[in-house]
Image (cartoon, helix red, strand yellow):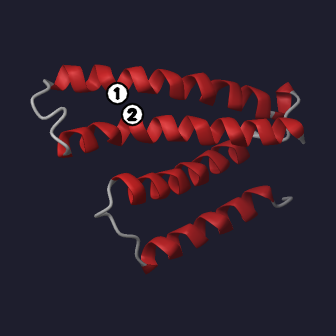
Amino acid sequence: MTNGIYTILLLIMSNVFMTFAWYGHLRLQQTGVSTNWPLYLVIAFSWVIAFFEYCCQVPANRIGFVDNGGPFNLVQLKVIQECISLVVFAIIANFIFQHEELHWNHAAAALCLVAAVYFVFMKP
């Protein structure tokens, strides 16, 4: 079970980096920091952050994968990653992009994700 915990922690860290790589430049633009940056510089900035995402994502998948002694099959790893990704995004968007509000339909979507996790872990 330790591999499962390490996998989830690494996936959380990976998704924090991913969220900043994908959306952090938008916040920098809002604050005026990167307003005049050419697109190639914004892309390079995001790739630097994405490097750290991969430094967490790849080990998470290797540690967590059943063929490597982990508790999760490939589909389970992907569904876990997607759920973590959306939870991390919602938290970061709420703190960094404070004008982005969560509504009832977002909660309904979150419940669907919980259902997806339930179904992917069910025995066929």
Which image quadrant: the N terminus?
A: top right
Name the spot of residue 121 as percent of width and height, x first.
Answer: 79, 57
Tag 2: Cα neighbours inside 10 Å, few (<14), some, or many (≥20)?
Answer: many
Q: Quadrant of residue 116?
A: bottom right
The answer to whether 81 appears left or right of 52 in the picture is right
Which is nearer the N-term, disc 2 or disc 1?
2
Name the spot of residue 19 as percent of width and height, x first.
Answer: 44, 42
54 w.r.t. 13: above or below: above
Name the spot of residue 38 as percent of width and height, x first.
Answer: 13, 24
The answer to whether 7 appears left or right of 46 in the picture is right
The answer to whether 41 appears left or right of 90 in the picture is left
Mark 1 lies on residue: 46
| Residue 74 can be seen in this image | no
Tag 1: Cα neighbours inside 10 Å, few (<14), some, or many (≥20)?
Answer: many
* Marker disc for residue 21: 2
Secondary structure category for the residue under label 2 = helix
Name the foreground residue: 94 vs 38: 94
Which image quadrant: the C terminus?
A: bottom right
| Residue 5 can be seen in this image | yes
Extreme-left residue of the structure: 36
> Residue, x 41% and y 56% (percent of image)?
95
Circle 2/circle 1 CB separation < 8 Å = yes
111 w.r.t. 94: above or below: below
Amino acid on which disc 2 is placed: Ala
> Residue, x 51% and y 70% (percent of image)?
109
Name the spot of residue 91 as percent of width and height, x first.
Answer: 49, 57
> Residue, x 39% and y 33% (percent of image)?
21
> Residue, x 19% and y 40% (percent of image)?
29
Name the foreground residue: 106 vs 25: 25
Amino acid on which disc 1 is placed: Ser
* Marker disc for residue 74: none
Secondary structure category for the residue under label 1 = helix
